[in-house]
Image (cartoon, coloured by chain):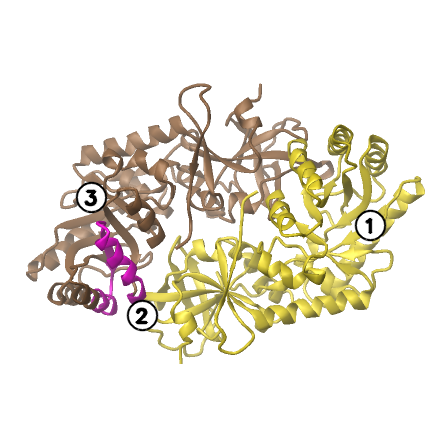
Chain colours: A brown, B yellow
Amino acid sequence: MPDPRLSALPTPCLLVDEAKMKRNIDRLSAQATALGVSLRPHLKTTKSVDAARYVLTGGNGPATVSTLAEAEAFARVGVTDIIYAVGITAPKLDRVIALHRSGCNLIVLLDNVVQAQAVATASRSSSIAIPALIEIDCDGHRSGLTFDDPTLLDVGRILTQGGAALHGVLCHAGGSYGAVGVAAQAKCAEQERLAVVNAAEALRGAGLQCPVVSVGSTPTAHAAQDLTGVTEMRAGVYVFFDLVMAGIEVCCIDDIALSVLTTVIGHQSTRGWIICDAGWMAMSRDRGTAAQDVDQGYGIVCDSAGVPIPGLIMVQANQEHGVIARRPDFKGAVPAIPVGTQLRILPNHACATAAQHSGYNVIPETPEATLMNWPRFGGW
Amino acid sequence: MPDPRLSALPTPCLLVDEAKMKRNIDRLSAQATALGVSLRPHLKTTKSVDAARYVLTGGNGPATVSTLAEAEAFARVGVTDIIYAVGITAPKLDRVIALHRSGCNLIVLLDNVVQAQAVATASRSSSIAIPALIEIDCDGHRSGLTFDDPTLLDVGRILTQGGAALHGVLCHAGGSYGAVGVAAQAKCAEQERLAVVNAAEALRGAGLQCPVVSVGSTPTAHAAQDLTGVTEMRAGVYVFFDLVMAGIEVCCIDDIALSVLTTVIGHQSTRGWIICDAGWMAMSRDRGTAAQDVDQGYGIVCDSAGVPIPGLIMVQANQEHGVIARRPDFKGAVPAIPVGTQLRILPNHACATAAQHSGYNVIPETPEATLMNWPRFGGW
């Protein structure tokens, strides 16, 4: 029996299952408490004030963002402790200073001397000691300094002596997205912990302050066994989870709280294809599971209640067309799915899929309650 | 010497080169004139009223769209002849009827009996003969009926007898995106032409009307040698072009009018990486050139004037970080690119990259004139 709340929605659109989302949030909160660190959620996945209220301590607590547009949007609604976790550049410092003047303590991230000099210069000229974290590399994934790189102390001194505030060190174990299973991810978490703890000790050993020691990625946050020396952890996609996270066993398929609602618009019977109105514009072009053991195509196909239909994935996507077909290795029967049927597609990567939409249709945990609508924003 | 108009832009952001865009538009207009067909541009690439004025005949002429949101946005500014080129479903017909009542002749697309019945029912109940095109398949790419499928006549009769208006037939040779070079693409164009001309003849032979015979894809539109029996052609991405189109020789790299402006935020010198602030959120996850002879990664790296820097591509992308490095096979020297340098990245797929942004910064063809800002929209 189709859900009349969903039948009334224009497709394609985003759905969030509030009960699953709350379960995911509770799981990581309990983990942070058990490990004795504070949790600083990354709001880049949801980019929604409504969703942020669920994850921020007291609804307004410490946050991480990936763009100044996010920082500005969350500052406007009262979030005052934010890490902007992408390397800063000089032209962006005017907006950083404006945020500080509006009462938001925005912490910037950097890993080189040019950035440190720019932050010091801006601190002096604005008379605001801009707080900065030094990015530490633990796995060669992207940015950051290793703890034994002499630049670490140079950057620390430029900040401290130049009038900025050396806030601490931060590491993101991006390599953990390639680690399958909790044991492998726990090793990544320990590598991440050691990298920042060693960097903090190097700074302190040189007479520099390092109050904050920040780690985080969704896999390491869930797998960490011990975070001695760490003060906080960050994670983002855990709120929704997705097929990439399920593929490395951080969650189950049933934990995925985000899906795209779509409608069947046709068939190509000779090829066994079902054509639906969710293409890559609705799903994103993210094919994160392509490199995993089980390639989920553009997503797992569920009925409109969110139950996976065995054997069916979205095998291709054009801009506004999705092609649903059986998995290459599936031998069972697949049901007939007539034109007009609503389906849900579980995404490869929640951050990327959500970014294609301007809002969420949220199915409340209270049965049969009216759907909630949470706007989301984008931009830089 | 950096362009002060670009230095003032926050990065990442979209740039359009107006002169290149106009050159691309003129090229396809001349081709349509030479072939004796009208050109019905697809507005899904630009999704911008300002950009649409350049491609629509007289600024308001016939158009193609991929969503009802596009149809509504263009109808509001006076475009009255629009094909909605994605298979219709019953719940969307209320908005189709509303568009007709507002004075926009929106033509829907379908390829099956269920859709035809829905359009007929809506036509009768609204007393508007909704015009419908039957989608024809020429290459097994996606949707559509072959000319000899008996469903073709069934659908035509349901529309005609049911009170809708059988407007004609439409084909999109999506398979042409895999054809390299003008000779291969000309074959696709002839296959596309034959598919619709045969379908039109089948309908006419059964006593049904078929005034419109529509073909189109950017590769076939440029390569077609003869369009006898065709009334109009459609294309979208030709306005900007992109690396996928360059990879199959529909255009040159120098024709690409769209790029993403980014700023260098750091380096990983041991790996030869340059880190910039355009990740997949700015570029999209589209990796269309991965399947081509030359994989361009997430894009070709240019200096801020738009000139490609030999050997450099974006090899990886995280949400807000792009990793620039030398191509695996490049043996030459690459220049040092300091933190703070602005670069431009040419995208794999203009439709996907543009969709990640809320507007275009347009460099006017008049030298040193002020940048134009063209908003774009999304949604369904």
Residue B119 lies in quadrant: top right
x, y percent for residue B251? 64, 69
Q: Does the magenta-highlighted stretch encompass residue A376?
A: no
The amino acid type found where label 2 is placed reads Val
Task: Assess whether residue A102 is covered by the magenta stretch.
Answer: yes
Q: Position of residue B202 (x, y in %)?
A: 89, 44
- Report which residue position mark 1 lands on: B212
> Tag 1, which secondary structure?
strand
Please tell me if label 2 and label 3 are on a single chain. no
Q: In the rendering, which numbered label is found on residue A232?
A: 3
Task: Report the chain holding disc 1.
Answer: B
Q: Which residue is mark 2?
A: B339
Chief SS of the magenta region: helix
Which residue is drawn at the image coordinates 7% and 62% (left, top)?
A206
The magenta region covers A90-119
Quadrant into which the N terminus of chain B falls: bottom left
Q: Tell me which chain the residue with mark 3 is part of.
A: A
Q: Residue at x 19, y 50 (%)?
A: A194
Q: CA distance from mark 3 to mark 1?
A: 64 Å
Q: Secondary structure at mark 2?
A: loop
Position of A142 compared to B65: left or right? left
Badge 1 and badge 2 in a common chain: yes
Q: Which residue shows up at 30% across the image and 46% down it?
A: A76
